[in-house]
């Protein structure tokens, strides 16, 4: 059976719906919302923003889900490695638990692989993201400059061996500054 939504790259006409969907979804789940919606808008302004890595699920003209992958760097002692950061992934309230988030994850991971990306990091639920192969990034030797507490800082190798020997601090672009954990 074909799902009742399509997944495609975001378009400028989707921006308002993405924001309108993101705020209540993150408010309900985490008590936030504005920071994630603002992050999406700031990442679109980055010179290395790739709209083909910002996907929406659309049902009858309504954006019901969104995933964004953007570039980060893993900075080691003697080397650095490119990676993508998955942030955020959201599904419209009233459309959750229908497979939309999982479909967006699979599409986002496939798109990243097609483009030759090797690794992805994120801050999120190990139970949810573990289903897609994400593992504790600290165990891989990576640390998160945003201060994400273990075990919520996760990594995924998109190609075999892409996490082997990759150790260091994940450096995020300026749009992520508002999401830094202060420890308070």
Image (cartoon, rainbow, N blue to C red):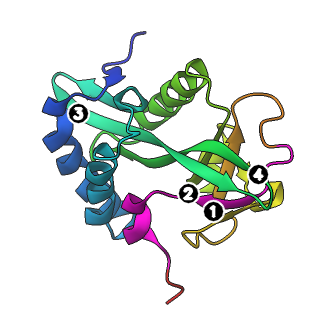
Task: Categorize mark 1 by other alpha carbons within 10 Å: few (<14), some (14-19), many (20+).
Answer: some
Question: Are circles 3 and 2 on residues that touch, CB within 8 Å?
Answer: no
Distance from label 4 to label 2 (Cα)? Answer: 26 Å
* Residue drawn at (67%, 53%) of the image: 74
Q: Identify the secondary structure beneath mark 2.
A: loop
> Which labelled disc corresponds to residue 19?
none
Looking at the image, tell me whether mark 1 or mark 2 is earlier in sequence order. Answer: 2
The residue singled out by tag 3 in the image is 63
Regarding mark 3 in the picture, which secondary structure is present there? strand
Which label sits in the foreground, 1 or 4? Answer: 4
Tell me whether the residue at label 1 lies in contact with that at label 2, contact meaning CB atoms closer than 8 angstroms: yes
Disc 4 target residue: 79
153 displayed left or right of 1: right
C-alpha gap between disc 3 and disc 2: 22 Å
Question: Which residue is tagged 1?
Answer: 152
Give the spatial CA distance, label 1 vs label 4.
Answer: 25 Å
Contact (CB < 8 A) between labels 3 and 1?
no
Which is more N-terminal, label 2 or label 3? 3
Residue 6, position in %: x, y? 32, 19
- Lower sequence index among marks 1 and 4: 4
Residue in the picture at 33% in, 56% down: 39
Magenta span covers which residues? 164-181
| Badge 3 or badge 4: first in the primary sequence | 3
Residue pointed to by mark 2: 124
Q: Residues within 10 Å of mark 3 (few under 14, many from 20)?
A: many
The label nearer to you, 4 versus 2, is 4
Q: Which of 26 and 168 is in front in this view?
A: 168
Q: Which residue is drawn at 31% across and 64% down?
A: 35
How packed is label 4: few (under 14 Cα within 10 Å), some, or many (20 or more)? Answer: few
């Amino acid at each position: 059976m074909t799902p009742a939504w399509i997944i495609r790259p975001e378009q400028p006409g989707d921006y308002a719906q993405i924001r309108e969907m993101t705020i209540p979804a993150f408010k309900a789940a985490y008590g936030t919302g504005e920071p994630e919606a603002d992050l999406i808008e700031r990442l679109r302004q980055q010179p290395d923003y790739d709209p083909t890595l910002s996907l929406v699920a659309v049902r009858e003209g309504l954006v019901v889900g969104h995933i964004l992958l953007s570039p980060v760097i893993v900075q080691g002692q003697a080397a650095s490695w490119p990676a993508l950061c998955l942030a955020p992934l959201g599904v419209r309230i009233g459309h959750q638990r229908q497979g939309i988030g999982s479909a967006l994850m699979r599409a986002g991971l496939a798109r990243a692989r097609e483009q030759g990306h090797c690794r992805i990091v994120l801050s999120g639920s190990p139970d949810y993201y573990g289903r897609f192969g994400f593992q504790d990034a600290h165990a891989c030797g990576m640390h998160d400059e945003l201060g994400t507490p273990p075990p919520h800082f996760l990594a995924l190798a998109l190609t075999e061996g892409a996490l082997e020997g990759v150790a260091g601090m994940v450096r995020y672009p300026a749009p992520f500054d508002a999401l830094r954990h202060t420890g308070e």
